[in-house]
């Protein structure tokens, strides 16, 4: 068996610990952080070759840094992709994808159930002549009907934020390819530990590394996993010129986060399932959104295309905004913040935070009402989290 064949047979947990790094001159076991803005050259000729791109090697940390490269290579391996480009945030990953692959006159189909800022970003692209149509993430007929001759990208976040709706990635990818378009999947909620969109036919995967890839709420970053040709010809020149770059320190944090990703996502999924089951039977809760529940409309689809159901649970509290806010303010173990994917459990009121800048009509179309509460279930003992939710619901 060749080294390449051996590496190709490695499990995801092994890739998370070892892919993308080799010991350096110091034979370190843990990858170092290369905190440097620039790199030196042996001579003027080498400098010229590096800048011209005729010789591979480090030039300037805006676009070449060993720590960032290690994170990129490891994430690409875990996603089953050819290459990856790391960016300064999850939103810059989506912006990079759009600006590199779209032009004036192009049309985008986007799920209307995505992070609120993602809706805003695609709406802003209209000033550059790029039109976006928003459709239901679960209505395949609506996606097909909205296709145009100039549709160049289908963008979907699955599970969706915050209602955990599940889109059929394989079906959307086939629709995109039949119409000479690209299928882009935001894999933030699942990560490659629970879902690998490229294996289902998607062309590109985007990430907010800030969330579960980091896993402890420490740094902001993003990533795009794509075919090597696209990364080389489209994304890398844009990164080099426009500079939405990931810092080496953040890349090191994410690189270390990937080492425990499979363990954490398994625990997040198991704990979230316990909280979802508790909430579903509570008399003050009118509805629970979690793909792991048999009552979830796309439960069967999620079971087919995911290996776990994730750590995000949303639910509606009877009594509107007042009841939702009272619940949030009464919790003792949940941090009130708009992040997710942390070891600490988090509670969010989407209608007034993550999706607060959308219009009431947009939120209504997405199914986000005033009584909706989103939980990012952390790694605390689920019995303690349930006890906390119980006392807050009984206030």
Image (spheres, rainbow, N blue to C red):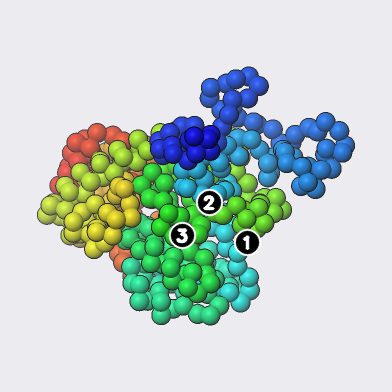
Position in image of residue 139 (x %, y %): 33, 72
Position in image of residue 169 (x %, y %): 39, 62
Q: In this view, does 84 lie to the left or right of 355?
A: right
Q: In this view, does 72 lie to the left or right of 327?
A: right
Q: Is residue 317 left or right of residue 28?
A: left
Tell me how far mark 3 sits from mark 1, CA to CA: 17 Å
Are the residues tagged 3 and 1 within 8 Å (C-beta)? no
Question: Are there few (<14), some (14-19), or many (20+) residues within 10 Å of tag 3?
Answer: many
Q: Residue sitting at 53 percent across and 22 percent down?
A: 29
In this view, 159 is above or below 358: above
In this view, 126 is above or below 296: below
Q: Residue sitting at 53 percent across and 51 percent down?
A: 225
| Dot 1 or dot 2, earlier in sequence | 1
Residue named by callout 2: 225
Residue named by callout 1: 100
Residue named by callout 3: 202
Question: Are there few (<14), some (14-19), or many (20+) residues within 10 Å of tag 1?
Answer: some
Residue 98 seen in render: yes
Between 11 and 224, which is closer to the camera in this rendering? Answer: 11
| Dot 2 or dot 3, earlier in sequence | 3
Q: What element carries label 1?
A: helix
Direction top: furthest residue? 26
Q: What element carries label 3?
A: loop
Query: For residue 390, what is the image quadrant?
Result: top left
Count all numbered tags in the image, as a single digit.
Answer: 3
Q: What element carries label 2?
A: strand
Direction front: furthest residue? 1
Are the residues tagged 1 and 2 within 8 Å (C-beta)? no
Position in image of residue 111 (x %, y %): 41, 67
- Image disc number at residue 144: none
Q: Residue sitting at 27 percent across and 38 percent down?
A: 332
């Amino acid at each position: 068996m060749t080294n390449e064949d051996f590496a190709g047979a490695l499990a995801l947990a092994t890739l998370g610990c070892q892919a993308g790094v080799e010991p350096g001159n110091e034979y370190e076991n843990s990858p170092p952080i290369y905190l440097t803005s620039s790199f030196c050259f042996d001579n003027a000729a080498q400098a010229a070759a590096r800048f011209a791109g005729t010789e591979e090697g480090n030039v300037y940390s805006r676009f070449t840094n060993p720590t960032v490269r290690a994170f990129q290579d490891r994430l690409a391996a875990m996603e089953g992709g050819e290459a990856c480009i790391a960016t300064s945030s999850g939103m810059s990953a989506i912006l990079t994808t759009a600006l590199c692959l779209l032009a004036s006159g192009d049309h985008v189909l986007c799920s209307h159930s995505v992070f609120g800022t993602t809706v805003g970003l695609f709406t802003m692209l209209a000033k550059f002549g790029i039109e976006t149509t928003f459709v239901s993430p679960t209505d395949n007929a609506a996606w097909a009907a909205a296709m145009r001759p100039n549709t160049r990208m289908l963008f979907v976040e699955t599970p969706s934020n915050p209602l955990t709706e599940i889109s059929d990635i394989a079906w959307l990818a086939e629709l995109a390819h039949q119409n000479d378009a690209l299928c882009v999947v935001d894999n933030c909620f699942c990560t490659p530990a629970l879902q690998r969109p490229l294996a289902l036919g998607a062309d590109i995967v985007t990430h907010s590394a800030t969330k579960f890839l980091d896993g402890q709420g420490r740094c902001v970053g993003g990533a795009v996993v794509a075919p090597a040709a696209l990364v080389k010809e489209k994304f890398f020149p844009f990164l080099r010129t426009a500079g939405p770059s990931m810092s080496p320190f953040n890349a090191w944090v994410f690189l270390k986060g990937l080492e425990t990703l499979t363990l954490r996502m398994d625990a997040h999924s198991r704990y979230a399932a316990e909280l979802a089951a508790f909430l579903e039977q509570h008399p003050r809760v009118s509805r629970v959104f979690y793909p792991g529940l048999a009552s979830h409309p796309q439960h069967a689809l999620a079971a087919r295309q995911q290996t776990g159901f994730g750590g995000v649970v949303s639910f509606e509290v009877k009594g509107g905004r007042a009841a939702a806010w009272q619940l949030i303010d009464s919790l003792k173990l949940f941090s009130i913040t708009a992040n997710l994917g942390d070891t600490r459990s988090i509670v969010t009121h989407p209608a007034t935070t993550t999706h607060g800048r959308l219009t009431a009509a947009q939120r209504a179309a997405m199914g986000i009402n005033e009584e909706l509460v989103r939980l990012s279930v952390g790694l605390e003992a689920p019995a303690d989290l349930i006890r906390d939710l119980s006392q807050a619901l009984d206030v």
